Image (cartoon, grey):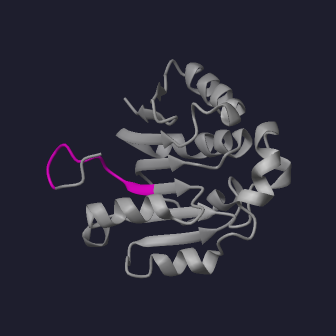
Amino acid sequence: VGLGEGSDQTAGDFVELGVFRGHTTLFVADYLEFGALDRTWRLYDTFDGIPDDQLDANWAASNQKAYQGTFTFEEVRDRFASFPNIRVVKGRVPEVLAGDDLPEKIAFLHMDLNNSTAEIAALDLLYDRLSPGGVIVFDDYCWEVSRAQHEAEKAWFAQRGLHILPMPTGQGVFVKP
């Protein structure tokens, strides 16, 4: 995703679905000096774990232990106080994406919801907003615990004649043609 001035710049803002403590975003925002960019980064999370009705079988055992009550919305929001263009939004995906605050164009989308139901619903809502050249990173794409996500996302893209590139990190990467 080109961030500088020029014709190779991918249009749009950044979106992260599934923030947890915000480590990934904070690292990238610091590295890119995101606060100085003319873009917005929206971070969406329940801040209370994966909703029970969205749990894939392999995530059920770790949901409460790993996520619930570990980091509050306020703590994550405060981590990004020095970035005027990063917004932390509490809510359940996909419902929270129905608001008016979504970017018209997305240059970068990070999916880390750890459940196939919400990730596929998010793709249905956000894919058309992804700019040509825009990137989606699927955080847990190749992990056994995420098999349901992998299969659902692989099928979603295959229906459109597209593919996600599996990475040795366990992530998946997609660049929109």
| 101 vs 113: above or below | below
**Of 125 and 56, which appears nearest the observer?**
56
Q: Quadrant of residue 104?
A: bottom left
The answer to whether residue 6 is magenta is yes
Residue at point 54%, 77% (across, down)? 77
**Of 173 and 161, which appears nearest the observer?**
173
Q: Position of residue 42 (x, y in %)?
A: 49, 64
Q: Quadrant of residue 141?
A: top right
Residue at point 57%, 60% (across, down)? 19
Q: Position of residue 25 (x, y in %)?
A: 44, 61
Extreme-right residue of the structure? 53
| 17 vs 158: above or below | below
Does 168 sit left or right of 92 as displayed? left
| 18 vs 142: above or below | below
For the N terminus, which image quadrant?
Answer: top left
Residue at point 67%, 35% (across, down)? 146
Asked if residue 72 can be seen in this view, the reply is: yes
| 25 vs 61: above or below | below
Does 117 sit left or right of 160 as displayed? right
> Over which residues does the magenta segment extend?
5-14
Does 7 sit left or right of 100 as displayed? left
Tag count: 0
**Of 97 and 73, which appears nearest the observer?**
73
The answer to whether residue 46 is magenta is no
Asked if residue 54 can be seen in this view, the reply is: no
Q: Position of residue 31 (x, y in %)?
A: 28, 61
For the C terminus, which image quadrant?
Answer: top left
Q: Main secondary structure of the magenta part?
A: loop
Q: Position of residue 110 (x, y in %)?
A: 49, 49
Residue at point 57%, 30% (across, down)? 142
